Amino acid sequence: MKIKVALICILFFSASLFCGCSDDDNPVTTVPKSVGTYEGTNSMNKPVSITIGNIGGDAWVTEYSIEYETTVQNSTLSGTLASENTDGIVRVNNNTFSIDLDQSGGTLTAAVEDNAVSGAFNFFVSVPLGGTTAVAGTFSTSKR
């Protein structure tokens, strides 16, 4: 009889050890498919780069760079509009995003599809002799 009681006690305590573990002790964080660096060219045949990072399980644009070239009063004006923020510039929502580029209403809008990001941009740059001029174009990039 003592052996039966001892076996029942051992069986009971063994079973309680298995119940103490939980499947969610180490949750798996999924990485959004769009995370990566995308490179390509714009309608001015100049380089464009966009980086999408994983911030808290969500896709965020963390860096962009747009080289541009425009003609102002018979001279060529070129430059690069770029920004980087490891905390995220803007969240990618439903595979699209829109970034306010400057105080005058400039924007970069894009859609993420498969391994590509494409969209359009418009912004204003200062002209050496005073004033501003608009820069606008489209771009297409692919994941590197």
Image (spheres, rainbow, N blue to C red):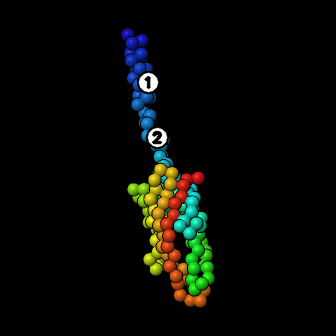
The residue at 50%/70% (across/down) is 137
**Residue at 42% in and 12% down:** 3
- Disc 2: CA contacts within 10 A as few (<14), some (14-19) or many (>=20): few
Who is closer to the viewer here, 13 or 106?
106
Q: Answer left or right for 48 relative to 119.
A: right
- Asked if 89 appears above or below 129 in the picture, the reply is above
In the image, 122 versus 98, the foreground residue is 122
Residue 66 visible? The answer is: no
Query: Given this view, does label 2 or label 1 mark the residue nearer the observer?
Result: 2
Residue beneath label 2, please? 25
**Which mark, residue 6?**
none
Amino acid type of the residue tagged 1 in the rendering: Ser
Specify the farthest residue to the bottom. 129
Q: Element type at marker 1?
A: helix
Q: Which residue is mark 1?
A: 14
Locate residue 6 relative to residue 80 in the image: left or right: left
Residue 74 at what x, y percent from top left?
A: 60, 84
The quadrant in which residue 46 appears is bottom right
User: Identity of the amino acid at label 2?
Assistant: Asp
- Tell me where residue 77 appears, x and y as whole percent: 60, 79
Cβ–Cβ under 8 Å for marks 2 and 1: no
Q: Dot 1 surroundings within 10 Å: few (below 14), some, or many (20 or more)?
A: few
Q: Position of residue 49 (x, y in %)?
A: 57, 62
Residue farthest top in this picture:
1
Residue at horizontal 46 percent and vertical 80 percent from the top: 104
Question: Closer to the N terminus: mark 2 or mark 1?
Answer: 1
Q: Position of residue 105 (x, y in %)?
A: 44, 77
Say above or below: 86 vs 114: below
Q: CA distance from mark 2 to mark 1?
A: 21 Å
Residue at 46% x, 43% y is: 27
